[in-house]
Amino acid sequence: MAGLRRYQRYAEELTALIRSGEMAPGTRLPSVREASRSRRISPATVFEAFYLLQARGLIESRPRSGFFVRSAPQAAPVRATSTAPRSRAVAVSDLVFEVLEATRRPGVAPLGSAFPGVDLFPLKQLARALNTGMRQLEPARIVEDLPPGNERLRRQIALRYALSGTRVAPDEIVITNGAMEALTLSLQAVTQPGDAVVVESPCFYAALQALERLRLKVVEIPCDPRHGLDLAALRMALHRQDVKACWLMPSFQNPTGASMPEARRRELLALLESHEVPLVEDDVYAELYYGAHPPSPAKAFDSRGLVMHCSSFSKCLAPGYRVGWVAAGRYAQAITRAKVMTTLSTAVPSQQALAEYLAHGGYERHLRKLRRTLARQHEIAARMAARYFPAGTQLSSPEGGYFLWVQFPQGVDTLQMHREALERGINIAPGQIFSATRAFGNCLRLNFGHPRDARFEPALKVIGELAAAALRP
Amino acid sequence: MAGLRRYQRYAEELTALIRSGEMAPGTRLPSVREASRSRRISPATVFEAFYLLQARGLIESRPRSGFFVRSAPQAAPVRATSTAPRSRAVAVSDLVFEVLEATRRPGVAPLGSAFPGVDLFPLKQLARALNTGMRQLEPARIVEDLPPGNERLRRQIALRYALSGTRVAPDEIVITNGAMEALTLSLQAVTQPGDAVVVESPCFYAALQALERLRLKVVEIPCDPRHGLDLAALRMALHRQDVKACWLMPSFQNPTGASMPEARRRELLALLESHEVPLVEDDVYAELYYGAHPPSPAKAFDSRGLVMHCSSFSKCLAPGYRVGWVAAGRYAQAITRAKVMTTLSTAVPSQQALAEYLAHGGYERHLRKLRRTLARQHEIAARMAARYFPAGTQLSSPEGGYFLWVQFPQGVDTLQMHREALERGINIAPGQIFSATRAFGNCLRLNFGHPRDARFEPALKVIGELAAAALRP
């Protein structure tokens, strides 16, 4: 635990005790004064540690009694899992655009943004790779790099899969205009208008928009901020209705940050295989893990080519270059053709830049630094949230990415908060845009991926004040 | 007529006489010997001139009688115009891919290609503009250049409209991933699955593929290689059925090369306005005119915002950069949002390169040279086609672009020819891929936009031989 500050070390010790069960649910923690004396640390440090544990959902504060280990140590899914969700039409796109377009005003604090800070990316090295790549380009390739795309780049991507233990052949990789195109082409490859598609609840709003645009029906399956998708509910949904595809994020889910444990990923794949249901796997945060190793994508357990694993360089290396891909299994040819028919091909300069950078640019070094930065930012954000948000607020505890999922006590309306915050120069992503049911009205997704943005702490303070005001009787 | 060769000058004189009516349909031309004597030019030169007129569809050879002015001086549309075409489902995509994918083998002569030769483009200057553009890029813009896209680029594009006399505001321009994305997003903005859409017959195969993919029905309206769309047939179609959109190429139509005269464009717009039918105008060859002035796009006559004018830099400046746009009239916001939902945004490096090149790169100089080259190539190709193709073959006479539409006598099957030619290392685009009805089985589209490709003339000779062999009794 070298490099951790004192309060962090204390919090880690307590976390280990709670997670191992040595401190059982319901156990009362020492008082701040007791802990301060016995550990020879200041009361402020103890407080910081307790706040952090509270932010992680591990302990809770009971008025006039102190802190206790929580029985449900994470933010609970909002909806019950005992009934199989029904499919429904989607009509959320207008609300999403209303929120997103309002937040594109210059100067607002980007707490609702979908991107991390641009200063986290090696833009100069990329521009050099772009220049080198274009100098090396044989002219004929400017019209010949049609889908599936630049071969050197596809080999580099296949190599990265191999390094993380997932077998993907370059032949099944189709380069796309960012992950968004990969996801929508994948979805279209296996659905027709009117079909039902499973998503997590809450889920990335763009998945809902894609379903709405393609006139698909949605089946929302609860997603727990710690373990991810509720497999029992999924099993029931697959059993009871004709689901044509799932669009899921097993790693660092947007917006909850949830990651499914590996055993549950295997179980997911077995379930999908038994129903012959293809999976569109959105894995755009794959490289942004805080731990020592990346989680294996669901694709790693796919023996039948049912998984279309979609990712991109937009969130981990090269925003704006618009280079994504899908490792498309049995759907590779269909997606290649669909790509030709919709956008023809992906920009050659961008593909050249990425191929060159991946070969020579120091990608691993950049990623290590980026992961460290985001992990540190997560700690800072969780601590600040614990300090400024009202009692009873629950936070997710992501192991990668740059989003916190915040669940305020009932009574807070984050869509209303979004409007009020915007007036004060702060942009947040209210919970309602992450579900076709308009649930999660007391939740918000908090982007903490802007470490050099001094507006972050004051903005959290404002959000906390707005939440507290909403809770006042 | 300075700069023309002797046979060309003679052919131009005769063309003027025929077009003015001084040489009426049915008039017999002088014999080669007579013309050679009276004009003091060699018989070979007279022959060249007559071949050129024949290729233009202005004269015809009658066995043992000599050459006569044709009564129908252009390739006639294949289908009659007296009945209103019915809408039908489209199932052409597999055939198109079979043809296109076969022709991507390395080393084949690219007569069926959709692109002109890459050596016609200022790739080095573009790479410099790319480098400069990326150096000047303010980092935040890498994530902020969301649709509608780079503002500087949109202003440059609006300026080019203004220079050619068409009023388009930067605000209605949406930057896309090439024209293909502009076209498909435009089509989707105004249709739902099952709707009927008008296209030309023959038309660009990608339009048919887009309709098939979106489960739209097609109404094919004959397109005459000289005057373009048959407005009487369109009028009937709009009167008799509920058409939701037209996807048309008024200028240098792909594949026929047809251009509608300005009066007919006005008439087209009046007709569409009276039925409130939006027009997706595919104008990707707009800059490739041979004459002194560009034709005005249909968009120029659009007073109600019904025209979505789609174009790109891929055919005239920067293939592979994937920068296109749509000037979308009243549909600009819908298309902006659809773009966000499908591919999010267009590659920033490509947008920067184009914005920089248009401002400082010498675009006009490049275009003047490119237009001269293509016009010269057209003459060469028409002459060679006249020399090598069997009697009775009709050629279009485009005034821009780089395609000849070749109509062989009945009996030639160009799909069969495509397979035979491919075995001999030649790629052609058979007529069947340009219609959902599988008409045009004796036609092909000939790309003459590779002036430095020495395989062109031998390939035409082979095609002529294959056609002649098919016609042998």
Image (tube, coloured by chain):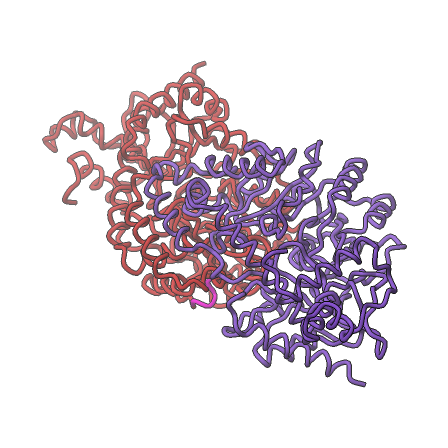
Chain colours: A red, B purple
- Assess whether residue A172 is covered by the magenta stretch: yes
Q: Is residue B183 left or right of residue A150?
A: right
Residue sitting farthest toward the left: A40
Q: Considering depth in this image, is B34 or B22 the residue closer to the camera?
A: B34
Residue at left offset 68%, top offset 77%? B464
- Assess whether residue A253 is covered by the magenta stretch: no
User: Is residue B212 visible to the viewer in this orientation of the structure?
Assistant: no
Residue sitting farthest toward the right: B82
Location of residue A406 in the rendering, given as x and y in whole percent from the top left corner: 40, 32
Location of residue A5 in the rendering, given as x and y in whole percent from the top left corner: 16, 36
Q: Is residue A194 left or right of residue B321?
A: right
User: Across the whole image, how many numbered discs are drawn on residues?
Assistant: 0
Q: Considering depth in this image, is B470 or A291 the residue closer to the camera?
A: B470
Magenta part of the protein: which range? A170-174
Q: Quadrant of the C terminus of chain B?
A: bottom right
Location of residue B359 in the rendering, given as x and y in whole percent from the top left corner: 44, 40
Q: Is residue B106 above or below residue B289?
A: below
Q: Is residue A252 above or below residue B372?
A: above
Q: Considering depth in this image, is B423 or A247 the residue closer to the camera?
A: B423
Which quadrant of the structure image shows residue B356?
A: top left
Residue sitting farthest toward the bottom: B473
Q: Quadrant of the N terminus of chain B?
A: bottom right
Q: Is residue A11 above or below residue B427?
A: above
User: Is residue B145 visible to the viewer in this orientation of the structure?
Assistant: yes
Q: Main secondary structure of the magenta part?
A: helix
Q: Is residue B452 above or below residue B141?
A: below
Which quadrant of the structure image shows residue A164?
A: bottom left
